[in-house]
Structure formats: C-alpha cells, structure tokens
Image (cartoon, rainbow, N blue to C red):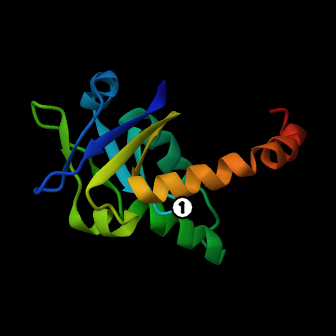
Amino acid sequence: MFIGEYHHALDDKGRVQIPVKFRLDLQKGAVMTRGLDRCLFVYTKKEWQVMAEKLAKLPIAKANSRAFARLMLAGAMELEMDKQGRAVLPEYLRQYAGLKKMVVVAGLYNRLELWDRDAWERYRSGTEKQSGDIAEALSELGV
C-alpha cells in the first residue's frame, strides 16, 4: 500500500529519488505512464497488469475509450531505479507533467503520483477548499 507525500528534487539527468518505503515493491517491477490532472502514475507490475487488462477491454468503437487507452498505454514505460533509489523520468513524461525542479511523490494506495511541486500545491489547495462538497458527493458511493 502506497501512502504519504514526499518532496524530492529532480536532478540534472532527469532522475528523482523514490522514497525508501516504496522501493521494495517497485524493485519487483514497475510501470510509469501519463496520469490524469497532468501528473505521472506509477504502478507495480501487478497493478499495471490489472489496469492494462481493463484498458484493453474498453470498447474500441468509442472515442473516449480509445483516447483514454492511448493516454495510458502509449506513454507507458518500465520504471527502473538505480542503486541509490533514483528513477529516470524520460523527457516526454517530464514535459507532460510539467516537472521542473521539485517533485512531489504522492502515495495513493495502489499507485504513486508524481507531480510538479507548484502544480501539486495548487491542486491540493483547491481540493482542500472543496473537501466538504467532495465528501458529500462521494457519500452516495459509500465513502
């Protein structure tokens, strides 16, 4: 289970430190891809397999299904960490997420999200202001 929020610098080679508590699960294999809200998603290989199978089953005749599958699958790549626990983020994914110098690594149960720190702060601040409305809307789902 991935939980927590961690701040790390992106180095000159496009690498970011993966928090120690997440490394063991990710060393068994991980996939990084474009996420929603202009962040990057990181899944363990096991979780990625579940997601990829769901995407493959989306109806190809529907434009939104094709678009979402392309967003997630075409941008995906295996995440590799060096001995210091740094992962290389390719240029196309850094550009997609607008990653500059500081990166937030957020644990969201079955995935990690990588955000530009300033974008994360704006997103988090806006969500916190709307938390009551969001909770009320989600109450219908049993949350």
**In the image, residue 92 lies at what x, y percent?**
28, 68
| Residue type marked 1 | Asp
**In the image, residue 68 lies at what x, y percent?**
55, 66
Image quadrant where one finds the C terminus: top right
Residue under label 1, please give it. 37
What element does badge 1 sit on? loop
For this rendering, which residue is in front, 86 or 120? Answer: 120
Q: In percent of the image, x 22 and y 51: which residue is there?
A: 10
Q: In percent of the image, x 32 and y 39: which residue is there?
A: 30
Few, some or many C-alpha atoms within 10 Å of disc 1 (few <14, some 14-19, many ≥20)?
A: few
For this rendering, which residue is in front, 8 or 26? Answer: 8
In the depicted structure, whether residue 7 falls above or below residue 2: below
User: In the figure, residue 14 lies in which quadrant?
Assistant: bottom left
Q: In percent of the image, x 40 and y 53: which residue is there?
A: 117
**In the image, residue 82 lies at what x, y percent?**
11, 37
Residue 61 visible in the snapshot = no
Answer with left or right where residue 71 lies relative to residue 126. left
In the depicted structure, whether residue 115 falls above or below residue 69: above
Q: In percent of the image, x 31 and y 69: which residue is there?
A: 95
For this rendering, which residue is in front, 29 or 87? Answer: 87
